[in-house]
Image (cartoon, helix red, strand yellow):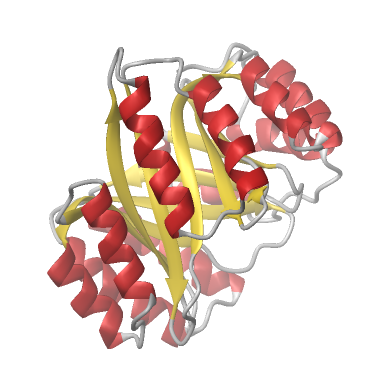
Amino acid sequence: MSAGIRYPSLAALIERLALCQALIVADDIGRIEQVLKSALDTYTELAFRSDGRRIDLITVSNDPAVGQSYFNLLEQRGASEKAIAGCQRFLQLGRGKTIIFKLPVAGPLEGGEVYIRGALPLAELFSTLEQDSVYSPALSLIQEIGQLTKKDHSRMLGRDVAERPFYTTFFTTYLAEEQEELDSQLLQKYLIKIGVNDIGQELLMAAHALFSLNRPQTLFISLQTAAGQPAVRAKLDYEGVRLRWIDEVMRWAGLNEAAEILTEWSQVLGLKKASYVGLPICEKGIDGFRVYFRLSGL
């Protein structure tokens, strides 16, 4: 998906979007655009957060040099040697696979996230998490969601660049045409397993009905956990969702101000559809929105 409005640089576009949320742009934005250019030329994505806390830049590469440039940027920002080394060890699990890099570019600039894209057997994944003291019941819940989606592997595995990181395990299910009842049943079981109350389930099922209209597509179901924490954070991600549908669900969730800012983003970008929309989940239902815009030609 291409941005409908051209800006002289990625930095200029981010500065314009940051104005919508009164955020300060990273002072190293020019360097980021320069050193990650080879990856950004191929894949550039910006992430909107309904809490207005920050803007994230996302790119994708299987080039080890891009990963080194990414970690150099984090080191210059003050990331600890331990956090970076731990993250680099983690990426060895995905040797030969494509890596997704996320970097804050406006608002608080601490940390970053990396994701290994591609199938990872759950046994191998659990071994990695256990080495970082992620134990049951978190691993048990991840296993249960894998069984629910009929997967013995993850679709992606993410990690924070931090000394005590969060890990995010992604499963997928295919939203086929004329299969609405089947995936609604699966989602209902998922929401029950992660402890969403009845009112929250009702809101999320209504959002699912709207966001899954664009069929066929892949629904991403993820669970995030950290060392020593039995609880998990859950999230749903939908592909190719119209912004007017996102606006509607935001208002259902009482996030009217965030909906107005997202409208500003769409006007700045000249887009009417998001590449993805993410729904973090809590006991009461929707716990915010993440809206991702893939850009090109910057």
Measuring from the top left, give residue 250's x and y in whole percent: 72, 32
Residue at 45 percent across and 22 percent down: it is 212
Q: Is residue 237 left or right of residue 169?
A: right
Residues 124 and 178: in front is: 178
Residue at 62 percent across and 58 percent down: it is 283
Measuring from the top left, give residue 295's x and y in whole percent: 50, 25
Q: Quadrant of the N terminus?
A: top left
User: How many numbered marks have been drawn onto this rendered protein structure?
Assistant: 0
Residues 84 and 167: in front is: 167
Measuring from the top left, give residue 181's x and y in whole percent: 36, 24
Residue at 17 percent across and 55 percent down: it is 153
Q: Is residue 288 above or below residue 239?
A: below
Residues 114 and 217: in front is: 217
Q: Is residue 53 visible?
A: yes
Measuring from the top left, give residue 182's x and y in whole percent: 31, 29
Residues 198 and 298: in front is: 198
